[in-house]
Every structure is written in structure tokens, then in C-alpha cells.
């Protein structure tokens, strides 16, 4: 049921990205023959027009209930690397193929992670807050309140895939010792100095000055950083989460930050997004929050479009898709 029509219609569904503009900017010779496209910017628009589409390019606007309303649909190309919002079983039952955008943002996310590590170590978040209040902080006699360096420190990376591997190489360039945590350690070091299985996470956390999450959200990684894991981390260590909010038990993280056991946290993702106004994370001075922008770049639409074009060609040739999930 995966045969694509000769003149497939592509629906780009995103509230902010100019995906249609990026597609239209391709030379005619590079666009798959016979295709036409339109863009929607809301769930309501997507639901109203899903029946017209042979291909959907989406992420946050996706609803799995749309599968039942899309008789022409053959391919969903995710805009994001994460695909936990898509029901793979339902896709298979409807004969719709699904591919992620893994790799389109590995440079951005890994650089965002290293930026958070540096910002928290150098207390840039505090300097920005002081700037807003016109406060010139004096030199500190208390060592615990001073800026620090990341060189010579140990970083544990949970999720040593493409993003985690690139983060490992960046961290090593700063002189860090990197321990990778991955489901299958036999897959290799991928830039780390050491690698352990996910089940052995608690054994390496006591060595961590910094912990970074770059893993997908799966049954294995859901709530992987809970009160037990946080307690196992070094006192005054730092956590950054570039994965998914559901990988961290938020209440346990807040408690560890309030107690001072954790020095700071950098969060690009939260359990509920947007982060609710009532969340204490907003006002915690030792927390740096970015609004799930770790993968953002000025060329993101072009990267996703390039991946889409390749996968349309593969679908037509009956080949396995790049980053195929279903």
C-alpha cells in the first residue's frame, strides 16, 4: 500500500517554518517530478486538508487520529529527529511510511549542549540576570560562587547516537573526559573515552561533573533521570537536557536543585511545552531554560527539504527510506 501516485501532493505542516518556501526555492530539476505542495500552519488546517495529501511533512502539528482521514497518505516525513509523537503501530496498520529528520539538526543540538555546559560553568545566566538589574557583581571569595572551567571534568552523555557522538567530540576538544551511555555498548565509543550500557548508568553517575541527555524518548529512557539517579550524581554537578522532557522526572529535578545537590540545570525541553507559567523552573536562578530551540538553525528548512526529496525518490524506487521508522 506504499505505492506513490504519479503526481503526489505534499502537505507541509508547521506553525513557524517556511518549508513550502524552501521547497519552492529548489530548482525545478531538483524537485521530484509531478509533485505539488501546499502549507498549513495549524492543527485545524491540517485536519481539514489531510485528505488531499500523499505526503505530509510535520512534527508538532501531527495527530495520529489523522491517519483514518487520509486515504491517499503514503509518507510522513518528520520535521524533527524525535518521533515519539507518532504511533508506529498505527502507521504500519494504515500502510503509511514514517521517517525521522535525524541528522538534520545534530550539529545544532550538540553545539547547543556544549553552549549550555559552558554557560552554566561560566555562570553566564547569572551575568545576564545581573545585567538586566544593572548589578556589577564583585569578585567572589567563596569558591562555590565562582565561575568554573569544563576542561578536566567528566561528562556523562546519555544517548550516544549522532548527536551524542558529536557532543562527545566537542567536549573532548575542551579537554573533558567523556563517558557515553548507550543501549548497545558494542556499537562503539563514537567519540567517547568510555561507554557503558544504559542499565549501568547508576554506576557511572557518581563520576559525573556534568550529565547531558541526548537520547530519544523510549520506554527505556522515560524517567531515566529520577530521584535515584540524581542522588547518585556528584554533589554540585550540572545536568543539561537536550533530549525530551519525559526523560527527566521534573519534580525530582526541582527538589535536587532546591537542595543544592545539583548546582544547576540547562533545559531545552520540559515535560509540558510550552513550560507552564506556574512552573518553579522559570524563577530558579540556577536553571537556564531555552524553548526547545536546540535544533534551530537558519538553514533548517533546507536540510529537511533535502531529506524529503531523497525519501520521495526512495519511496518511488521501493527502497528503504533515510531514517525510516515504519
Image: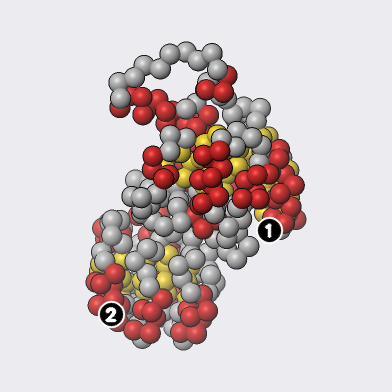
Q: In this rendering, is residue 225 above or below 116?
A: below
Tell me what residue is drawn at x 53 percent, y 21 percent. Answer: 146
* Distance in Å between CA atoms under marks 1 and 2: 40 Å
Q: Which mark is residue 87?
A: none
Quadrant in which residue 313 is drawn: bottom left
User: Which of the two residues, 201 or 233, is positioned nearer the viewer here?
Assistant: 233
Tell me what residue is drawn at x 49 percent, y 55 percent. Answer: 245
Residue 84, horizontal then vertical, whole percent:
49, 66
User: Which of the two residues, 5 or 205, is positioned nearer the viewer here?
Assistant: 205
- Identify the secondary structure beneath mark 1: loop
Q: In this rendering, is residue 182 above or below 157?
A: below
Q: Residues within 10 Å of mark 1 (few under 14, many from 20)?
A: some
Q: Residues within 10 Å of mark 2 (few under 14, many from 20)?
A: some
Quadrant in which residue 63 is drawn: bottom left
Of labels 1 and 2, earlier in sequence is 2
User: Which of the two residues, 267 or 166, is positioned nearer the viewer here?
Assistant: 267
Tell me what residue is drawn at x 51 percent, y 75 percent. Answer: 88
Task: Quickly name the residue at label 1.
Answer: 183
Task: Quickly name the residue at label 2.
Answer: 52
Amino acid at each position: 500500500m506504499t505505492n506513490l501516485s504519479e503526481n503526489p501532493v505534499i502537505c507541509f505542516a508547521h506553525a513557524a517554518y517556511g518549508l513550502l518556501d524552501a521547497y519552492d526555492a529548489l530548482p525545478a530539476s531538483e524537485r521530484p517530478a509531478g509533485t505539488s505542495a501546499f502549507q498549513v500552519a495549524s492543527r485545524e488546517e491540517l485536519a481539514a486538508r489531510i485528505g488531499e495529501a500523499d505526503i505530509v511533512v510535520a512534527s508538532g502539528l501531527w495527530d495520529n487520529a489523522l491517519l483514518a482521514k487520509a486515504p491517499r497518505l503514503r509518507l510522513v516525513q518528520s520535521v524533527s529527529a524525535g518521533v515519539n509523537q507518532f504511533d508506529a503501530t498505527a502507521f504500519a496498520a494504515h500502510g503509511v511510511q514514517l521517517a525521522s529528520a535525524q541528522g538534520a539538526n545534530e550539529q545544532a543540538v550538540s553545539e547547543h549542549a556544549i553552549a549550555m555546559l559552558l554557560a552554566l560553568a561560566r555562570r553566564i545566566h547569572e551575568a545576564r540576570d545581573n545585567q538586566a538589574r544593572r548589578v556589577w557583581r564583585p569578585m567572589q571569595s567563596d569558591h562555590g560562587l565562582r565561575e568554573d572551567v569544563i576542561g578536566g571534568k567528566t561528562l556523562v552523555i546519555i544517548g550516544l547516537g549522532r548527536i551524542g557522538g558529536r557532543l562527545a567530540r566537542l567536549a573532548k576538544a575542551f579537554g573533558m573526559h567523556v563517558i557515553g551511555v548507550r543501549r548497545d555498548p558494542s556499537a562503539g565509543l563514537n567519540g567517547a573515552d568510555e561507554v557503558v550500557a544504559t542499565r549501568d548508568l547508576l554506576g557511572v553517575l557518581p563520576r559525573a561533573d556534568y550529565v547531558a541527555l541526548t537520547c530519544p524518548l523510549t520506554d527505556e529512557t522515560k524517567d531515566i533521570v529520577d530521584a535515584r539517579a540524581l542522588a547518585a550524581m556528584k554533589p554540585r554537578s550540572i545536568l543539561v537536557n537536550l533530549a525530551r522532557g519525559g526523560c527527566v522526572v521534573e519534580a525530582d529535578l526541582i527538589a535536587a536543585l532546591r537542595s543544592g545537590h545539583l548546582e544547576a540545570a540547562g533545559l531545552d525541553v520540559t515535560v509540558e511545552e510550552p513550560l507552564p507559567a506556574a512552573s518553579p523552573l522559570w524563577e530558579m536562578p540556577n536553571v537556564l531554560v531555552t524553548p526547545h530551540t536546540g535544533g534551530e538553525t537558519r538553514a533548517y528548512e533546507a536540510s529537511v527539504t533535502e531529506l524529503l526529496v531523497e525519501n520521495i525518490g526512495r519511496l518511488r524506487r521501493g527502497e528503504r527510506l533515510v531514517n525510516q521508522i515504519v
